[in-house]
Image (tube, helix red, strand yellow):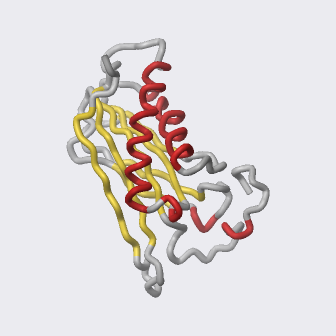
């Protein structure tokens, strides 16, 4: 029996033309793909979460491909992942997404080097979570530090988990605070 039972999925895309300054030539697009699943461990302690983490790779791949199909693989410059566990679960049920969601995005995006940032919480139904974003090839590219809100109005229910992947097409539209630029990334270590 599968450990993954999806109740619903959502795909959200924001298009940002400006942030109070002049409109940009190419708008920034940020997108979040979410899946709400039954928490197989709700209400009880499970010592071995590794089978769940391994099975979640398929869900991660599904969500990552959905984002790449929407944005275009060649356009993706930022990424992140998130999980919200319903109140009958525990934070470790969200932590399984670190490997599963991160691995899926790296595989679909041809193995970028930067760490995949994340956010997670145990919360009530309807909770919204701000998810940090940064550049996929080097996490110290300041222009690409951003965030996107994820959540679904009726999720997660107490015995559910909402898993999300987030991708975007660039840095902040009016970035002008210096630091390492994406063009200056040269080390190839995922940092600089």
The x, y position of residue 58, in whole percent, is: 42, 34
Q: Is residue 136 left or right of residue 36?
A: right
Q: Depth check: give the residue in front, 58 or 92.
A: 58
- Point out the residue furthest to the bottom here: 22
Residue 83 versus residue 180 in the image, above or below: above
Residue 82 versus residue 166 in the image, above or below: above
Q: Is residue 69 left or right of residue 155?
A: right
Residue at x-position 53% and y-position 67%: 170
The quadrant holding residue 182 is: bottom right
Residue 22 versus residue 35 in the image, above or below: below
Residue at x-position 59% and y-position 49%: 110
The x, y position of residue 174, in whole percent, is: 53, 77
Q: In this view, does 123 lie to the left or right of 110?
A: left
Q: Depth check: give the residue in front, 100 or 39.
A: 100
Q: In which quarter of the image is the N terminus?
A: top left
Residue 170 versus residue 21 in the image, above or below: above
């Amino acid at each position: 029996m599968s450990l993954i039972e999806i109740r619903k999925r959502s795909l959200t895309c924001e298009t940002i033309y400006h942030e109070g300054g002049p409109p940009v030539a190419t708008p920034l697009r940020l997108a979040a793909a979410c899946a709400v699943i039954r928490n197989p461990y709700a209400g009880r302690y499970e010592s071995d979460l590794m089978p769940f983490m391994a099975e979640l790779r398929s869900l991660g791949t599904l969500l990552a491909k959905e984002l790449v199909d929407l944005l275009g693989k060649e356009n993706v410059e930022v990424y992140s992942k998130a999980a919200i566990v319903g109140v009958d679960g525990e934070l470790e049920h969200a932590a399984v997404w670190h490997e599963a969601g991160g691995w899926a995005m790296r595989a679909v995006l041809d193995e970028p080097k930067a760490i995949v940032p994340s956010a997670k919480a145990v919360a009530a139904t309807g909770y919204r979570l701000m998810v940090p974003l940064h550049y996929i090839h080097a996490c110290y590219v300041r222009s690409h530090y951003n965030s996107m809100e994820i959540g679904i109005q009726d999720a997660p229910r107490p015995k559910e988990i909402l898993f999300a992947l987030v991708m975007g097409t660039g840095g902040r539209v009016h970035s002008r605070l210096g630091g390492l630029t994406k063009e200056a990334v040269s080390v190839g270590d995922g940092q600089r």
